[in-house]
Amino acid sequence: MALDLVHRESDPAAFDLEADRYCRRRGLDFRYLPRFCSYARTYSGTIDRDASFLLQERGETIGLAFVPLERRDDGLSVSIGGSFVPAPAVEGEEGERAAFARLDEIARTSGVRRVALHASLSVHPWQWNRLRVYGFIDSSGLDAVVDLMLDDASLWSTVRKSYRALINKYSDRNGYETLVVDASSPNRDFHETYRSLHAKCAGRVTRDKATFDLQYEMLLEGTATLMVLRCREGILGCAYFLHGGAAVDYFSMADDPDFAPMRLPISHVLVWAAVRHFKARGFSLLRLSPPAGFCRVEGFGDYSDAKGLGIAHFKHGVATRVVTGFRGIRYYDEDAFERDLEAFRTAFRGSFERND
């Protein structure tokens, strides 16, 4: 078949309109939506150019690839914050080959040193990591997911027993209230509270206000939801979720450290509230996202610190299962590979020493 390429650089506004239409027609993951791609570029802050493209057959879009060329310390990479971007979402194997061939061409002609991609559970129903076909080194990790198609009793039975009493005690009773902020009930003040708690919890401002403004725009557009846990003393914490197609992602959590001495199960209550809310809305899958590992080093590029392992332990207690998240890195420069390999050596040595 004759395939045509439409590049974002030629007409960004027209490209984004068609990309949005394609995402919604196919029910793609939110990561392909133009607004989220704008968030990703802003979050990075070091994008040299956005080489994203559409793949079309006889004028009809059959594929979309988000290709941010990010300036890192070691040169250009296709990545966001040095991490993975979604693999091309393409219909048909021939289209997939054409998309990866174009991605390879962009990388070579632009002097890219590494391309880091991940598959989406709802977009790439692969039984194995097909990124290997296109020269990528397998760098897969784990994701904890909640099957929202289960009935209420089955879902509740998968929650860790010690969590159930905590969730019951603080879920819309005993002076605690869970609020849903979304396109049908927007509230900028709550969203600003989420932003301030994000910095307060981290001890510093970790990212630009523009990224939070884009998050609120996604909320207004119906692709994001903010869950808020409130009590008489004030807002305890907020959890931000992104959604597209049939899937939801647990994207960000921020709680107020002033309430830490009370040892309240803020994450437990908010995630369970999200499970019930998104199940009622008809979504089929809630991804709790990395970190979801069991060890400090589980693979090439898959490392966790003590905090990450604690977060993963919590997620395992509310997830229905743990799945493989296919990821891969293709190298175009030996020095870039050596830098990542040295990072692996350092992480391994550190974990080995702690295990001793």
Image: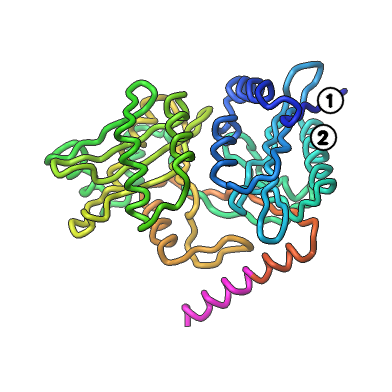
Q: Quadrant of residue 68?
A: top right
- Examine the residues drawn in magenta and state their main secondary structure: helix
Decide: marks 2, 1 in contact (CB < 8 A)?
A: yes
- How busy is the neighbourhood of tag 2: few (under 14 within 10 Å), some, or many (20 plus)? some
* Residue at the top extreme, as displayed: 59
- Of mark 2 and mark 1, the one earlier in the sequence is 1
In this view, 134 is above or below 280? below
Disc 2 residue type (three-letter): Ala
Give the number of the disc on residue 98: 2
Disc 1 residue type (three-letter): Leu
In this view, 260 is above or below 321? below
Residue 27 in the image: state x and y as whole percent. Answer: 57, 25
Magenta stretch, residue numbers: 343-356
Residue 333 is one of the magenta-drawn residues: no
Helix, strand or loop for disc 1? strand
- Dot 1 corresponds to which residue? 3
Asked whether, in this view, residue 12 is left or right of residue 261, the answer is: right
Give the number of the disc on residue 169: none
Residue 57 in the image: state x and y as whole percent. Answer: 80, 20
Q: Quadrant of residue 149?
A: top left
Residue 355 is one of the magenta-drawn residues: yes
Asked whether, in this view, residue 153 is left or right of residue 331, the answer is: left
